[in-house]
Image: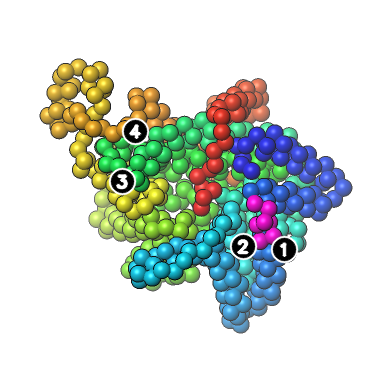
Amino acid sequence: MLFNSPEFIYLFVPIVLLGFFGIARFGHRHAAAWLMASSLFFYGWWNPAYVGFLLGSIFFNYSAGIALAREGSKSPQVRRRWPLIIAVAANLFLLGYFKYANFFLGSANSLLATHWSTIEIILPLGISFFTFTQIAFLVDSWRGIAREFNFIHYGLFVTYFPHLIAGPVLHHKEMMPQFARAETYRMSWENLSVGLTIFAIGLFKKVVLADSLAVYATPVFESAGHGVTLGFLEAWGGALAYTLQLYFDFSGYSDMAIGLSRMFGVTLPLNFNSPYKSLNIIEFWRRWHMTLSRFLRDYLYFPLGGNRKGNARRYVNLMATMLLGGLWHGAGWTFVIWGGLHGVYLAINHAWHGLKGQFDLPSDCLWTRALAWSITFLAVIVAWVFFRANSLDAAWSMLVAMAGVNGVAIPGEWSAAMHWRINAVFKAFGIGLGQAGTHVPDLMGWFKILACLVVALTMPNTQTLMARYRPALDFISKDVRAAWYSFRPHAVWVGFTVFLLVAALTRGATVSEFLYFQF
């Protein structure tokens, strides 16, 4: 069941919402159980067989967490690590089997010239997210941080449908207290209006913006995957379209998750904060998939030593963290390279910060900020090519075309519509008529791509619009209460919300999946 599907919007959400607050009148525990059961139904909509797998994972990790909490009650000097290692290894084994078994078998066959047969495996949706969520719970239990062990609340913490399929990655300590609060179980018109508005903004981003860009991205990457030689404009059109499609798709999902949860009186952590406004890669990873970045930092980068053992070790730790982060996104060498590229980017970024500190280089004037943004955005686009491509050959084909190796040509109809002097200038720079590519966006396509880029770079994001109502747990913003565009529960915002919902719900004949569902 998709957040943008009719059955979810018109049936599932109203029934679950009314049932939750109706049952809460007779007992909070029963209301939490209702929400957990509804979340399991939501998960089982795709494949009921995996509901048992999810429940088994919950029972195992809940039991292991209680056992590890006994270790957490001891002093750090006498805590045993092996129970934690066994529990975490069990989770990673299942994740590795379902997600990576065929990847490793295929890689071994290629490297060792073996002929091992691949396994027919159906990947459980959301396994990466609920596995990481529970690993964090196990570690926090062992550290003595996790303290509440109400089974219904724990089951709801893992299965909670707004985050279950594509995040955010939740922490036990930030969610369990909310499930225990009496205020959570009382219907609030403020929460409903704030949540519905955030949901409407996210739905609009997904259906109207992201899905409209897919028609310019998908054919180009598919052509590259089939070995078609791409043109310069064709490759750049596809790469830019995908860069923005993924942005609005994931931003839309993150908004919808936060909005849905807020309707139930539960505030989720922020997972997306205008990453394309970043002036460097370090800032980018503080804004993109923020809860995954937090998990990788706290449970991988820091345990590896972080930056505490010198710069060389820091760079090794960064590379290891990002390589594993890339592999987490998907079982393929394209994802490994994507993670490796970001590891290199981060190492260069940290080294550059060190040089700036030593030589007192200028860093806060208009031209340096513009240059920093341009370099960062270009680096992100190059990495996204590997992230989206079906193979290394397809990614390389895209990058070769984007570099102009195949020549730079413009469509004939463009040339015919331009003044002869402009054509002469193009010709002087080696830009001429030729095979520009089958899938070069038309003028309306380029307008959509550039308009979406302008929106991503200049418009206030959702959490800024909703700042006075604290839309996310860890959102910190300047005081925007006086801003004319900030959310207020009055007729103008009601009309705006209705417009967004109507525009999204009346668009398209099919319901498209979110891009992060495949990870």
* Rendered position, 278 above or below 129: above
Residue type, label 1:
Glu
Q: Residues within 10 Å of mark 1 (few under 14, many from 20)?
A: some
- First in residue order: circle 2 vs circle 1: 2
Residue indicated by mark 4: 439
Q: Secondary structure at mark 2?
A: helix
Q: Measuring 15% from the left and 19% from the top, which residue is drawn there? A: 421
The disc label shown at residue 134, or none: 2
Magenta stretch holds residue 467: no
Depth check, front residue: 315 or 112: 112
Residue type, label 3:
Gly
| Quarter occupied by residue 204 | top right
Q: Which residues are magenta?
A: 47-53
Q: Where is residue 225 shown, x and y percent of the image?
A: 35, 46
Residue type, label 4:
His
Q: Where is residue 4 shown, x and y percent of the image?
A: 60, 37
| Quarter occupied by residue 229 | top left
